Image (cartoon, helix red, strand yellow):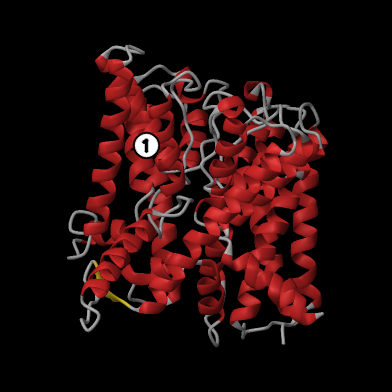
């Protein structure tokens, strides 16, 4: 039986964490005398009140079941997105109800899709809150909360395993508390290093912090209307490309690399395959752009490298608009918005590890068809994969394809053109952000109907929670009735 009080108490921790960043954003607005101070202050007060009440009126609950962990995870994301839209809606401007929800969900799920036609008109306090939603959502607000939760009777373990896929656990051989600490340390360290490098090579501190939040979270919200293209700085582009790529890799492998352990990003066969596939994609796009004489060979390589890495890691930054690129180059990029980064990272999408495992399973099935009496095992970086994991991977891939197909049908029913509908469905489900057509890399989602924005907001949450958690949660609700 699921205990409502247990869920409410832990949702309170989530809201208090949101309140902290709302207070920081409000402080920025206050000292800069901006008109976003009151909306941000109200948002902070509401989150604080809703977060504190469960701590006061509900006794401590130190044992959480897996089902309750699922509920905390799903409802934590929903409540976070709903309270996160308060400052936007109160500030006004382009932020209607639908737009406020879309921007909030996009930020927390690190999708990076925006409805804003003019980002630069936002006050710095609101821009910082917008960037903070990426920081909070990057590795999941639930994981941040886990760091401060008591380790009693599996509380952390229940919530953590409801938030993180089983495939991402292959590179972790330690307690949940240690895993959560490692993820947070790696995450914050990457942000700190990138911020310093961006400042050294031309950004001011504010832009450097905001872009680092978005890069390491593989989100893509920029403080500029033309994204990273605004800076027109190759050094900045190279720094962002490196951190986009490294942030799309398993954080456990990054930690192992720093500690000098045997299994790391240099020895992992999955990482090696991931980088090779990304490199091939860059060469294919650059070659097509050069062949079609869209750009010179140097420009083609520069733009192809940035755009493929940006979409392939689900970050969504841009240094060039892509709607007029050859269809071959667009399709290559679209593939990467489906594949995306690795499990155990801040990246969204299907995840390269699942595709890697799927093809290993396919080879296994071909061998079994040829030799029915044979016994074949699949290993990923030395770890034996059982049949349950293979089945889970195949089911997830099928669910993923069905979801973006249904979303595309719903969008086309609203008379949205095919390219826009298809790419918007893929990029929101994959938490990649910009797509093609009317939602291209330097475009936005403002022109879509409100109904489409609500559907795509749901799509972003489905992608962030990897679909299955939502389905399990809904079945739990139906059983309760």
- Other-residue count near label 1 (Cα within 10 Å), few / some / many at <14 / 14–19 / ≥20: many
Q: Answer with the quarter of the image where residue 169 lies.
A: bottom left
| Residue 370 visible in this rendered orientation of the protein | yes
Classify mark 1: helix, strand or loop: helix
Q: Residue at x 59, y 43 (%)?
A: 425
Residue 417: image x %, image y %? 64, 29
| Residue 39 visible in this rendered orientation of the protein | no
Quadrant of the snapshot with the N terminus: bottom right
Q: Would you name the residue on which mark 1 appears? A: 309
Report how many numbered discs are placed on residues in the image.
Answer: 1
Q: Residue at x 27, y 24 (%)?
A: 287
Residue 56: image x %, image y %? 78, 73
**Nearest the eye: 79 or 451:** 451
Q: Residue at x 38, y 40 (%)?
A: 244
**Nearest the eye: 341 or 133:** 341
Q: Answer with the quarter of the image where residue 222 lies.
A: top right
Residue 207: image x %, image y %? 50, 29
58 in relation to 410, above or below: below
Q: Horizontally, is 294 left or right of 457 in the view? A: left
Residue 226: image x %, image y %? 53, 20
49 in relation to 191, above or below: below
């Amino acid at each position: 039986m699921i205990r409502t009080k247990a869920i409410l108490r832990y949702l309170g921790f989530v809201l208090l964490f949101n309140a902290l960043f709302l207070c920081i954003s409000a402080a920025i607005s206050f000292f800069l005398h901006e008109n976003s101070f009151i909306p941000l202050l109200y948002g902070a007060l509401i989150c604080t009140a809703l977060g504190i009440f469960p701590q006061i009126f509900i006794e401590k609950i130190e044992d959480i079941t897996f089902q309750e962990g699922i509920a905390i995870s799903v409802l934590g994301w929903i409540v976070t997105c709903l309270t996160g839209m308060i400052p936007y809606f109160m500030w006004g401007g382009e932020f209607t109800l639908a737009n406020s929800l879309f921007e909030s969900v996009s930020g927390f799920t690190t999708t990076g899709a925006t409805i804003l036609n003019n980002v630069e008109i936002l006050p710095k306090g609101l821009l910082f809150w917008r960037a903070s939603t990426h920081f909070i959502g990057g590795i999941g607000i639930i994981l941040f909360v886990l760091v401060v939760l008591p380790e009693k009777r599996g509380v952390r373990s229940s919530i953590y395993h409801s938030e993180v896929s089983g495939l991402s656990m292959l590179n972790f051989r330690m307690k949940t508390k240690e895993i959560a600490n490692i993820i947070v340390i790696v995450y914050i360290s990457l942000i700190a290093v990138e911020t310093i490098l961006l400042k050294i090579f031309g950004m001011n501190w504010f832009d450097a912090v905001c872009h680092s939040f978005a890069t390491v979270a593989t989100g893509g919200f920029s403080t500029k209307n033309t994204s990273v293209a605004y800076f027109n700085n190759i050094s900045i582009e190279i720094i962002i490309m490196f951190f986009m790529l490294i942030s799309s890799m398993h954080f456990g492998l990054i930690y192992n690399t720093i500690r000098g352990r045997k299994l790391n990003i240099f020895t992992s066969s999955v990482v090696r395959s991931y980088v090779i596939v990304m490199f091939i994609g860059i060469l294919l796009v650059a070659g097509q752009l050069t062949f079609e004489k869209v750009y010179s060979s140097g420009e083609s390589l520069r733009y192809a490298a940035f755009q493929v890495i940006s979409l392939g890691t689900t970050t969504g930054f841009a240094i060039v608009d892509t709607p007029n690129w050859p269809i071959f180059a667009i399709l290559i990029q679209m593939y990467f918005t489906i594949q995306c980064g690795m499990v155990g990272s801040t990246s969204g999408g299907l995840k390269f590890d699942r595709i890697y495992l799927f093809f290993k399973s396919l080879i296994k099935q071909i061998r079994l068809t040829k030799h029915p009496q044979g016994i074949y095992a699949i290993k990923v970086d030395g770890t034996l994969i059982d049949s349950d994991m293979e089945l889970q991977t195949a089911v997830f891939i099928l669910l993923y394809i069905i979801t973006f197909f249904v979303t595309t049908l719903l969008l086309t029913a609203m008379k949205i053109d095919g390219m826009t509908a298809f790419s918007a469905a893929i990029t929101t489900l994959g938490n990649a952000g910009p797509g093609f057509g009317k939602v291209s890399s330097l475009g936005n989602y403002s022109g879509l109907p409100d109904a489409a924005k609500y559907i795509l907001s749901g799509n972003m949450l489905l992608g962030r929670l990897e679909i299955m958690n939502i389905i399990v949660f809904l079945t739990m609700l139906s059983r309760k009735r």
